[in-house]
Amino acid sequence: MKILVKSRRCVQKKWQPRLLQYQQLGDSSIACSEPQTQRRPLSQQGSLLQQRVGLPPDQTGEFATERTNMVREYRNDYSSSLGREMELLIFGHAGLPVVVFPTSCGHFFEFEDRGVVDALAPRIDAGQLQLICLDSVDMESWYNQDIPPRERIARHMQYEDYVLSEIVPLVRGKNPDPRLTALGCSFGGYHAVNIALRHPDVFTGLLSLSGAFDLSSFLRGYYDQDCYYHLPTHYLPNLTDPWFLDRYRRSNYVLATGWDDHCLVQNQNLDWIMSKAGIPHELHIWDSQNSHDWPTWQRMVQEYL
């Protein structure tokens, strides 16, 4: 089948065609887009990776994988921002650092289990990319139906603080590259877009694959200032601060989706908002079966990272 890759870039509030091409790619064969794995109790989570890779408790940490010389580091650190342990995986030793947010309620091992790390292995091995794959707290924030919406947004804000105050210093301590990209698929695309746009002094780029950006429906009608400032399609239309806009124009923002993607309209809406604000970015719309799915996302990261 043919995949249409459509790309445009906003420069000084004017749209200019930049790329229109067709690529011959194979059919998608997996019909699963967002694995909804059940979160384990914290007492069991610490051994989750050990069970999957067959490591005894004292052998977690940095090591080279069998299939390549890729550095693969597992960490399980206590987060003072979240008040609990948080697991993550780091792939690679150098290159562009990319903070990877999982899909809705997903886990830190998604990119490995779904073949995305393998798809990027040549560039990771060559020292061109470094992936920092995070765990989520979506089941404690946006998806937690057992707490009021106010507490959901508060928990999400604690997660953002975890990324900024704990993950970013970790990355900077390991990798001197001044760039930093936020990456996410589906619900992870929301996290990537929101944190990159809120903190353009920290993140120099974003890549959202099939992202969803207006999460108002998760709040059951509740709305306050914190909700406003964590919904990109709400705060961006009113943003006029040159401090933000100048940094946006020096960054690299890419949105990718598909014509059959149920998040297509959200991407088109954010595309329109960013265009109106004069924020340089690219929108890519793929004509592929099951574009909101891992096989397509694999191809997208190979194309745009």
Image (cartoon, helix red, strand yellow):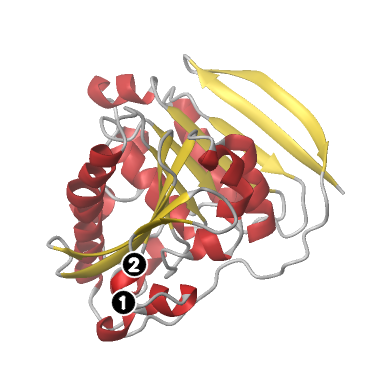
Q: Quadrant of the C terminus?
A: top right
- The percent coordinates of residue 47 (x first, y second) are 34, 79
- The percent coordinates of residue 172 (x first, y second) are 25, 38
Tag 2: residue type?
Thr
Tag 1: residue type?
Pro
CB contact under 8 Å: marks 2 and 1: yes
Mark 2 crowdedness (10 Å alpha carbons): few <14, some 14-19, many ≥20: some
- Residue located beneath label 2 in the image: 60
Query: Which residue lies most toward the top here?
Result: 12
Q: With respect to residue 46, does 272 lie above or below?
A: above
Q: Residue at x 21, y 55 (%)?
A: 162
Residue 48: mark: none
Q: Residue at x 45, y 46 (%)?
A: 183
Dividing the picture into quadrants, the one containing residue 122 is: top right
Q: Residue at x 24, y 46 (%)?
A: 170
Query: Which residue lies most toward the right here?
Result: 1
Q: Residue at x 22, y 65 (%)?
A: 155
Residue 57: mark: 1
Give the CA separation, mark 2 to mark 1. 6 Å
Dividing the picture into quadrants, the one containing residue 255 is: top right
- The percent coordinates of residue 27 (x first, y second) are 82, 56
Give the secondary structure at mark 2.
loop
Judge whether residue 46 can be spotted in this image. no
Judge whether residue 205 can be spotted in this image. yes
Q: With respect to residue 18, does 1 lie above or below?
A: below
Q: With respect to residue 15, does 204 lie above or below?
A: below
Give the secondary structure at mark 1.
helix
- The percent coordinates of residue 55 (x first, y second) are 41, 74
Q: Nearer the viewer, residue 194 or 68?
A: 68
